Amino acid sequence: MLEKFLGAIKQKVSNYFLGALPKSYSMSEENNILGLYDEHFLLTKNENLVGILRLEGVSYTHLSTEQLQDLFTERQMALDSLEKVVARLVVKRRKIDYKQSIQSDSQYLQAILNQFENKEVYENQYFLVLESAHSLQGVLEHKKKSFMHANRENFKDILSYKAHFLQETFKSLEIQLKNYAPKLLNSKEVLNFYAEYINGFDLPLKPLVGGYLSDSYIASSITFEKDYFIQESFNQKTYNRLIGIKAYESERITSIAVGALLYQETPLDIIFSIEPMSTHKTLSFLKERAKFSMSNLVKNELLEYQELVKTKRLSMQKFALNVLIKAPSLEDLDAQTSLILGLLFKENLVGVIETFGLKGGYFSFFPERIYLNHRLRFLTSKALACLMVFERQNLGFKANSWGNSPLSVFKNLDYSPFLFNFHNQEVSHNNAKEIARVNGHTLVIGATGSGKSTLISYLMMSALKYQNMRLLAFDRMQGLYSFTEFFKGHYHDGQSFSINPFCLEPNLQNLEFLQSFFLSMFDLAPSRDKEALEDMNAISGAIKSLYETLYPKDFSLLDFKETLKRTSSNQLSLSLEPYLNNPLFNALNDAFNSNAFLNVINIDAITQNPKDLGLLAYYLFYKILEESRKNDSGFLVFLDEFKSYVENDLLNTKINALITQARKANGVVVLALQDIYQLSGVKNAHSFLSNMGTLILYPQKNARELKHNFNVPLSETEISFLENTPLYARQVLVKNLGNGSSNMIDVSLEGLGRYLKIFNSDSSHVNKVKALQKDYPTEWREKLLKS
């Protein structure tokens, strides 16, 4: 008997809820959309209006605790301001094919960039949907109040009043949520928003404003199964499953669960259904709960809530949270469902697959259908503001000072695209008479084995797509050998490499550089000391004499020594002796061709002397900088282990000054260190850092040192990422020192496939390349790729 009685009650309840649903479904009837009311709003069949505010979102990674609190307060205030509307916050996560149009004369460069930069990524979009919810009584009350004021507003009908009220509500929200870059959609975009929800795919529409809609925007059929539904169009099926949040098994509500969903490789919608409660209804609800509560602790908390509500510092809403999962097959749908339920459970949200509430849940997302969602419950604006996540990772920049495209394309950790550039600002090339030279100098800090050399060599290769680019790299342990040889660059290795600063043309700027270069060689700083002045005059005199008597014939350091006048210090000739015995400096031939597109210097095979390294870097920096100035072209210089180049005090200052000048000549200097402690050992480290526009930081345990010792503005989120991410994850933090923003990106190059071996820096791979070059002089590149 009891079983029959319970079965009868269950049937009655089922009939009650299902009575609100149609027996057969006509989508044009059930979506409640009648037409386009005006430029911004849709008109429903019950003469309510619907509009949508799109929010771009913000990146939270670089924000301080205070900034995060301010954004939370803004979200809560926006919720508290809602009245006489029904709201839905819809987060759409979609998979998109990101494609770049790349043209290059090199078939390998073209193939590599096409393979790596054209990829599947995900994009999160946020939409705040508002629909008017005024009763006739409410409109009449407004009319009554209007007549009591001298400057009253007159509305020709109920709809014009609702349109005005909705417009004012959106204007208020745009101000309150300004940090999320809100934009009011036009009514055609609003209809397209619902058309995608109806059909399961984007259906571009161009309806007329002011007319009634036909069913032309409905292009799919929908079939409800027990715990999922299928949208079918043009023989393509989309499988959908609705997850409802049944309970919140924690006293502490956070945005972690919602945020985690937006970091998964799955398309989905997260839908917040919100029905604001009036102050009167909220107070009545809280008083009733307090009246029947047995706990003094709960009663006191409810009394606090009442005071906050009375002073307009808190509001309550009827609220439901749903996740709509989309997949191309039932198997994928099941797998994604398990993943999402697990993520929710981990953060104490009890999610259930909707069966009984599937149809009601689906139709509840249309205008005037919120009552069909049986997961509606009461929630404070404070708790709801915690759940709402308007997070959107920085996209990066579409162009830089070198060209009208990003240097490369990586993925943020939420799988959204990141348009990577060394430059820390976007530059417009279209119709620009003069291209801005923004700061692209970059410091890379990463341990041995982190993949730093592989990444840098790939980025150097990417730079070759820009017209007239020149690249210069100072290499260690032949890490760049494979890359340089594969792309037909000049790899300078061993005794054959030499420089001759006297190959510079005798213009004023070059003569001033030669003076500065040789002062550094002799460890002479500008001084008023009599002996020092005599030495300086002897150096400038010798330089001038050589160019007057020997130019345009070649002359060398030996000729310079023979031309130098003897001075009272007697030091010049003695100081020059070690360089005369060094073939790197004493040669007629200058092996560095600044016109070549790619020069790489193997420092290990050329010199280990810190001062010699500094002199070499100083000269080559200057030469490539001047060549780029003359030809109005961009250049990139890379120094691995750069600490060793700036140990000499004079050269430290002069190289730092050249880095500053490089920006004006459309140049970028990339410096690399193994860890932050190496930075501490660099003389004038703060000055070098101030010259940087970007940091690329690999995971490391002492990240906080950058903030405390070098005033790098790292947030707790950024420090946590650096100190807790394993090195093998192939993830880095890209910090923009211009605006303080940052991105945590995946720099794994596995997507290169067979081309990845080109950038291998291992010594065994270098030996393999050399062997192939010897055995197959013309075919070794293809042999390498096929090996």
Image (spheres, rainbow, N blue to C red):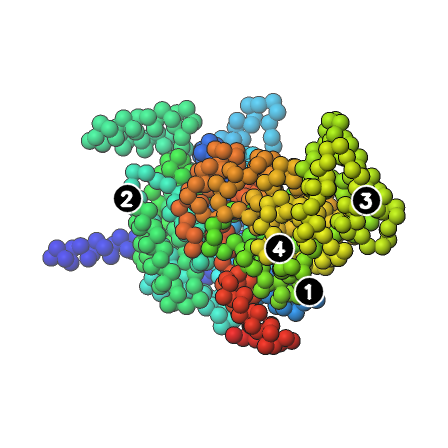
In the image, residue 601 above or below residue 182 = below
Secondary element type, mark 2: loop
Secondary element type, mark 3: helix
Q: Amino acid at mark 1?
A: Ser
What residue would you read off at disc 2? 249
Q: Amino acid at mark 3?
A: Thr
x and y percent of residue 350 in the render? 30, 49
Q: Which mark sits nearer the N-terminus, 3 or 4?
A: 3
Q: CA distance from mark 2 to mark 1?
A: 57 Å
Which numbered mark, 4 or 2, is in the foreground of this view? 4
- Residue drawn at x 59%, y 77% is 775
Q: Which mark sits nearer the N-terminus, 1 or 3?
A: 1
Q: How busy is the neighbourhood of tag 4: few (under 14 within 10 Å), some, or many (20 plus)?
A: some
Q: Nearer the viewer, residue 773 or 103?
A: 773
Secondary element type, mark 4: helix
Decide if residue 553 is in sight here.
yes
Asked if the residues shown at circle 2 and circle 1 are in contact, with their CB atoms under 8 angstroms apart, the answer is no
Decide if residue 264 is in sight here.
no
Q: CA distance from mark 4 to mark 2?
A: 66 Å
- Residue drawn at x 73%, y 55% is 587
Q: CA distance from mark 1 to mark 3?
A: 49 Å
What residue would you read off at disc 3? 563
Q: Which mark sits nearer the N-terminus, 4 or 2?
A: 2
